[in-house]
Amino acid sequence: MNASGSGHARPEGYVEPFTGLSAGLPTLGLPAIDAPAARLDLDPQRAARDLACLVLTIVELLRQLMERQAIRRIDQGGLEPDREERLGTALMLLDEHMTKLCEAHGLRRDELGLDLGPLGTLLADDW
């Protein structure tokens, strides 16, 4: 049996893949991770809430994009008045439904969004 634990004979000079791969590589100045501390202790209720927040953030992003597109089309004068009215009503209803969905999951609208680091948040108020 060889060093890898398999019963196959290795050719002379064979080196196990990835053995010593990290030797000599820079550490990038990152702190070492303590394995027990790095383990996650997930609370199922919090995980469900976070998932709902992520999904609602994406839905809110799409809602805002649709609203912006509708405003752009209205400003360009490309819609008939009755279609503008229907579009406005649909967007108001969608906004109300988003508020209800957030309430059903114990979230507030201002909690939605993803922190994109130096780019800011995904759902910025100043559009």
Image (cartoon, rainbow, N blue to C red):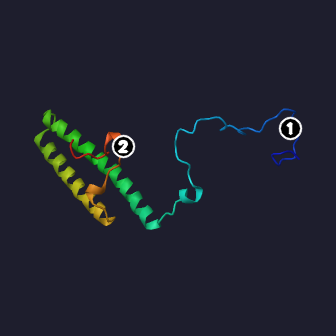
Identified at 27% across, 48% down, the residue is 63
Choose the circle earlier in sequence order: 1 or 2.
Answer: 1
Identified at 33% across, 39% down, the residue is 119
Q: Position of residue 103 (x, y in %)?
A: 28, 64
User: Disc 1 residue type?
Assistant: Arg
Local crowd at mark 1 within 10 Å, few (<14), some, or many (≥20)? some
Q: Is residue 40 left or right of residue 78?
A: right
Q: Is residue 30 left or right of residue 2?
A: left
CA–CA distance in space, label 1 to label 2: 49 Å
Q: Position of residue 99 (x, y in %)?
A: 25, 59
From this view, report whether residue 85 is shown above or below residue 42.
above
Closest to the observer: 73 or 51?
51
Local crowd at mark 2 within 10 Å, few (<14), some, or many (≥20)? few
Q: Quadrant of the C terminus?
A: top left
Closest to the observer: 35 or 84?
35
The circle on residue 10 is 1
SS under mark 2: helix
Q: Is residue 18 left or right of residue 2?
A: left
Reading the image, the residue beneath label 2 is: 117
